[in-house]
Amino acid sequence: MADPYAWLTPALTTIHRAQWHRTLEPVGGKAGPVVELGGQRVINFASNDYLGLAGDERLMAAAMAATAAHGTGSTGSRLTSGHRELHRDLEEAIAHLKQTEDAIVFSSGYLANLGAIAAVVGPRDGVMGDRYNHSSLKLGAKLSGATVYEFPHGDLGALTQLLQEHRGQHRRCLITTDSVFSMDGDLAAVPELLAIAAQYEAMVLIDEAHGTGVFGPRGAGVVEHCGCSGQPLIQVGTLSKALGSLGGYVAGSGELIDFLRNRAPSWIYTTGLSPADTAAAREAIALLPTEPQRRAQLWRNVDRVKQILGQSFPLLPSASPILCIELQSPAQALHLAAQCRQGGIWVPAIRPPTVPTSRLRFSMMATHNEDHFQQLLQVIESLSP
Ligand SMILES: *Cc1c(COP(=O)(O)O)cnc(C)c1O
């Protein structure tokens, strides 16, 4: 009898041959701008911890106090045994930050997208998404059973054309976009997108995974940055990036959130967020409006690193703390990432199929300092592509 798992060997060989193979490497030390990798001290340009909150003493204290009071696990779905005052408090804080009527917390940003999209559209509906959208938006659209249309990255003319041609065939339409494109660092044109959606009676879901905590005068995200708070839309995001914890959320109208509590399977049939994660995220949200200097420092650091990288390499257009050097091949990206690593600079090589072209992706933190940048400068100047 043939081995039913024999296909795995040639499948893995194909992944290796394309230089697409990934492996895991444990990070040592506390989350921060300097960590340990393979016993070496490296400067961390690989993290989504934009404000440096994942290692903040206050978040850690909040997580430990919540664990001491409630235990480690939330023990069940929110609808059964897993709902705590802590969860509701966090949801109210998110709604306040986003200036929406309500919010709902999921176990991750990925699950928030899967749940929200599958709840609001179905087989009779259409989803129009930017080609560079995050995997969770794409998979959510697919799982919903709706007809899925993709438009070229940032091409609102193409989106309008899709709506013109297909809006009439569908009961409901949903437009999905990242607010900050996670592998490029550029922004969606939120006001223009909302105007087009209104014209065609389409819903809009904006994924603020990389926007929350980073953009806007109060750190609410790109929607706030663009002056679009208060408009009818579905705002999704994560507690796992600038907020330094784990989990995801949807913020929107009271009716939308009530509907999701009743119809989002990735919320109903999964365990509630742990007390520690919930309390840490709650603490981070409390700090956003009171510590604007973190955002100001982050943006100064972005300018500094843009200058350092831009001297030697072409950068992809970015308006965020994500800065990418675009490269010719996966092999070149791996080669340069290895050279950086030897010089104590940790930057990931991002390759297909995650992105269409290979790149080094630097992400900035508010807690990087000039010493870190001096070392980066030295290494960048010594690179031989
Ligand atoms: C990281 C990310 C997510 C997933 O969030 P998690 O909380 O890590 O699951 C969703 N959307 C975008 C755009 C992201 O970058």
Image (spheres, rainbow, N blue to C red):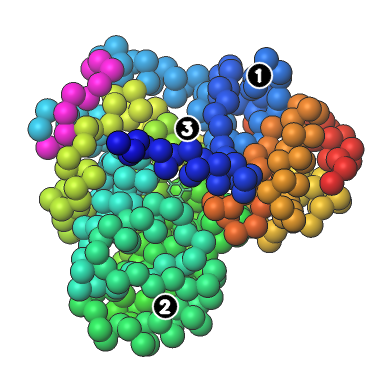
The tag on residue 67 is none
Q: Mark 3 points at which residue?
A: 244
Residue span colored magenta: 70-79
The dot on residue 195 is 2
Task: State the SS at label 1.
Answer: loop
Cα distance between the residues tagged 2 and 3: 33 Å
- Say whether marks 1 and 3 touch (CB < 8 Å): no
Decide if residue 237 is in sight here: yes
Q: What residue type is labelled 2?
A: Ala
Measuring from the top left, give residue 371's x and y in whole percent.
Answer: 79, 28
Q: Is residue 290 above or below residue 149?
A: above
Q: Which of marks 1 and 3 is in front?
A: 1
State the image coordinates of residue 375 (x, y, percent, origin top left): 82, 31
Return the residue at label 1: 38
- Image-quadrant location for residue 207: bottom left
Q: Do the residues labelled 2 and 3 touch (CB within 8 Å)?
A: no
- Residue under the image location 62 percent in, 45 percent down: 17
Tell me the crowding category of disc 3: few under 14, some 14 to 19, or many 20 or more residues within 10 angstroms, Cα based.
many
Residue 77 on the magenta span: yes
Q: Is residue 105 above or below residue 170?
A: above
Q: Could you tell me the amino acid type at mark 1?
A: Gly
Q: Which of 345 and 60 is in front in this view?
A: 345
